[in-house]
Image (cartoon, rainbow, N blue to C red):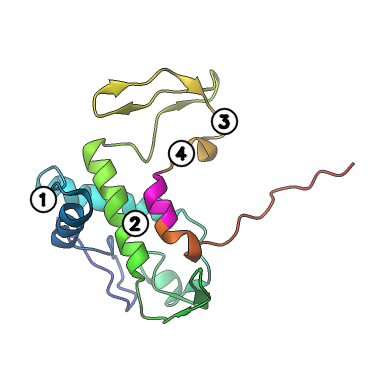
Amino acid sequence: MTLIIEDGTGVSGADSYVTVAECEAFSDKFFGTPITGTTAEIEAALRRAALFMDSFTWKGHKTHGREQGLAWPRKDVEDGEGQEIPEIEIPQEVKDAQCIFARAEAETPGLLTPVVNIADKKVLVEVKGIRWQPRAAPNTVEASRPVVTMAIDKVQGLLKAAEPKFLLRA
């Protein structure tokens, strides 16, 4: 199934910010190696990356409300340097982050949605065939999501600051 690309107009049913070709070019440029997999596998990785990114708490509001397929485009957004993002723009940081997440997903399918056993408070992580030892896991699946630091750093200025879930008073 061909990707439906969000172009800044609030495309209904959009499932990616970038094409396979754009993701391949990004991978070659920044990693020096191609993203692995067939076109269908890379498309699936791009879709999973976009879904993962939609779980972020972005600044502003969807430009076209619930009608648009993905979190972007957005209105009332400034980047980390205070520059306004036009309502019809998909920031390059968002596109780059999707490529980074998609590459990680293509190399290790399911990386963005790890298997977590909350009862045992253990997370098993396998990267490129190397099994790491189980490590203590936080008590929630949300807190157990892996962080692909490079991609998070790219979009940090577009995310809302974390708000405390509760306040402790002495």
Dot 3: element = loop
Q: Picture quarter containing residue 50?
A: bottom left
Would residue 6 be counted in the magenta stretch? no
Residue designated by label 3 = 138
Which amino acid type is shown beneath numbered disc 3? Pro
Residue designated by label 2 = 97
Residue in the image at 38% along x and 38% along y: 113
Chain-order first, disc 1 or disc 2: 1
Dot 4: element = loop
Which amino acid type is shown beneath numbered disc 1? Thr
Which amino acid type is shown beneath numbered disc 4? Arg
**What is the CA distance from the residue labelled 3 to the residue labelled 1?**
35 Å
Q: Please identify, in this view, whether the residue under mark 3 or under mark 2 is nearer the observer.
A: 2
Foreground pick, 147 / 61 = 147
Magenta stretch bounds = 148-153
Q: Picture quarter containing residue 54?
A: bottom left
Chain-order first, disc 4 or disc 3: 3
Percent from the top left, x then y, of residue 115?
Answer: 40, 29
**What is the CA distance from the residue labelled 1 to the residue labelled 4?**
26 Å
Chain-order first, disc 3 or disc 2: 2
Residue designated by label 4 = 145
Percent from the top left, x then y, of residue 6?
Answer: 28, 70
Tell which residue pokes out farthest to the left in this image: 38
Chain-order first, disc 1 or disc 4: 1
Chain-order first, disc 3 or disc 1: 1
User: Quick check: 66 left or right of 25?
Assistant: right
- Tell me the quadrant of the picture where the C terminus can be found: top right
Foreground pick, 101 / 64 = 101
